[in-house]
Amino acid sequence: MGSRASTLLREEEIEEIKKETGFSHSQITRLYSRFTSLDKGENGTLSREDFQRIPELAINPLGDRIINAFFPEGEDQVNFRGFMRTLAHFRPIEDNEKNKNPPTSEPLNSRTNKLLFAFRLYDLDRDDKISRDELLQVLRMMVGVNISDEQLGSIADRTIQEADTNGDNSISFSEFIKVLEKVDVEQKMSIRFLH
Amino acid sequence: HNVRKCTVNKTFDLALDLTHAKMEDFWAGALWALEIWLYLIISLIMVPAMFGFSLGISETYMNILVKTLEWATLKIQTAHAEEEVLKRSSSNELEELRRSRPKLLGGDFTLSDCFYFTRRGIESIVDDEVTQRFSSEELVSWNLLTRTNNHFQYISLKLTLVYGLGIFIRYCILAPLRITLAIIGLSWLVIGTSAVGLLPNGRVKSWLSEWAHVMCYRICARGLSAAIRYHNRENKPRKGGICVANHTTPIDIVILCNDACYAMVGQIHGGLMGVVQRAMVRSCPHVWFERAEMKDRHLVTKRLTDHVNDKTKLPILIFPEGTCINNTSVMMFKKGSFEIGATIYPVAIKYDPKFGDAFWNSSKYSMISYLLRMMTSWALVCNVWYLPAMHQQAGEDAVQFANRVKSAIARQGGLVDLQWDGGLKRGKVKETFKEQQQKMYSSMVVGEDSSSSD
């Protein structure tokens, strides 16, 4: 029944999540409703199948990579805290936050953290660099069968060439940031959350 | 000592006699109450239902109900401000992707291309168009039913009292009444149609069969406290056509059949449903299939076509979505019934969620528990719009025709028109949609819209 939503999430937990992610109280309860409605097994965690059940996500070419971002290394279940932590990356950066003195730890939705999320989409083996192979695999996910291997290979080579500054034939995170420094990351990697 | 025993025995016997008398009284009284109860039901509800007029009792009930709910709504401070509806622009996705990329010569790939897909993916995780259609609609303000209590907390003593009174009324007064009516209605359907089936074929038989059907459905409708309003009755489906409607619950059939007579299409079930189905087909032709026959598309189409071409047979009632949707949207219509080439009479059904949630969530509730929930709701209020007949136009294939009818129904009923398949309730989405997205993206990388490409 729907009344589970507000009773199972304790106030202390909501406060902790608020501090960690910056979401408002009502946003957290709303996202908790969404979490429980996705949780068909009703065990308080989401599995990869629960995400796959969303049709719009299942047809997204990068769907699998996005789902993977929710699960920590080697784990198959994500609880509500982990769910919120990942979604927090996409909270829009509010104007008053930009001007405030930077807090002791960087907020989850800072520009750097948003770029880190995107970097991890490409970095399949989580070794903090994007190799040619990894780039090719992600490219293949996005284009499907419509582009030949050779063409895709040359696209990957050119991308690495443009980004790589230290000559190790792979893209590190700082090189990634440099390439995208002119891109409006704050707007492109943010979604509007209803209040 | 013996005297005392005698007295004890005597008192004991006396007590036994008294209890016996009381018990008999009790049973006699109970029987008497039951008789009164049945007479009341028959006179006040069944007779008007059979002959189609109303005594105004349900109208008064509905008025009181509406006033009470309005009062309750005012009492509850809706902390929900008008929520900004996050309407994702339905504009061409390709354009959106193109606009979001930095200006590049000759198409090509940049590392920021993943941003678009990532953002769309996360948006669909936070809220998507499809999965919400398979569970009951969320209400903006509470309607004093336990089952819709999602976010509403304790407000005031008066409200809680009304709520408690509501529970008493619904479970102790309304529910037994409605269950009695439902049983009477169903048994009448079986008995009445079997009786009519004994008559020889002819005008009298079809007239009587229609009367028997409609009467039974009227009783069932009263059994659910259904208040139905029909609009545009001049467009009512006629013989030799197919009536299509959006599907929310099996009760849709009762709603539609209160006003006109239809031939049903479906699979023969066993048990009670099977008995009802077999009885119904005795008085007028319905199209029932064996389970194995349902798989054979040609057989199904042929039987439907034969039925439609016989101008004496009733219009067929079909729900092209194939499954129950929660009445906030209309999902993809299966093209089978649109290939036959008959006149299509679209009907839009919209339930008012304030009085009770009509949606049957078949994965959550069995049929019996669903019916019990229906009988303990306040009432069932719905609007039925008959839309003008539609024909397949030249140069239009079945899928386009189906979509055109679907849009018309969605527009009339105020429902969201979705392209997604209702089968997604249980099944996986087809790979072809993902391949479409990939193809679209590839065309941008390769740069088909520019002069130079690699």
Image: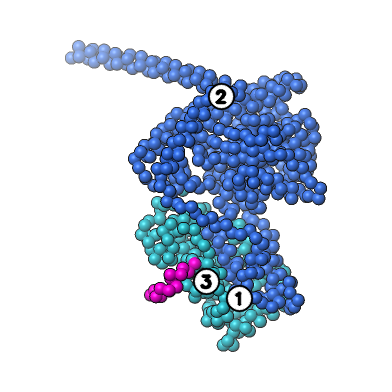
* Kind of residue at disc 1: Leu
Numbered circle sitting on residue A191: none
Q: Is residue B122 above or below residue B31?
A: below
Check if mark 1 and mark 2 are on a common chain: yes
Task: Indicate the position of residue B155 as horizontal and vertical percent values.
Answer: 37, 45
Q: Main secondary structure of the magenta part?
A: loop
- The Cα–Cα distance between marks 3 and 1, rounded to whole angstroms, is 15 Å
Q: Which chain is cyan?
A: A
Q: As rendered, which of B406 and B282 lies closer to the eye? A: B406
Query: Color used for chain B?
Result: blue
Q: Nearer the viewer, mark 1 or mark 2?
A: 2
Give the crowd class for mark 2: few <14, some 14-19, many >=20 residues within 10 Å: few
> Label 1 is found on which chain of the structure?
B
Does A90 sit left or right of B385 as displayed? left
- Left or right relative to B447: residue B65: left
Image quadrant where residue B13 sits: top left
Residue B342: image quadrant is top right
Q: Residue at x 46, y 58 (%)?
A: A195
Q: Magenta residues, as a range? A: A92-107
- From the top left corner, tell me how far across and down residue A71 is, in percent: 51, 66
Badge number at residue A186: 3
User: Is B54 on the left or on the right of B232, as rendered?
Assistant: left
Which of the image's four quarters has the N terminus of chain B? top left
Secondary structure at numbered mark 1: loop
**Which numbered tag is attached to residue B54?**
2
The residue marked by circle 3 belongs to what chain? A
Instruction: Look at the numbered disc 2 and give the secondary structure of its residue.
Output: loop
Is residue B293 visible in the rendered structure shown here?
Answer: no
Q: Is residue B230 left or right of residue B16?
A: right
* Residue A169 visible here: yes
Q: Circle 3 — which element? A: helix
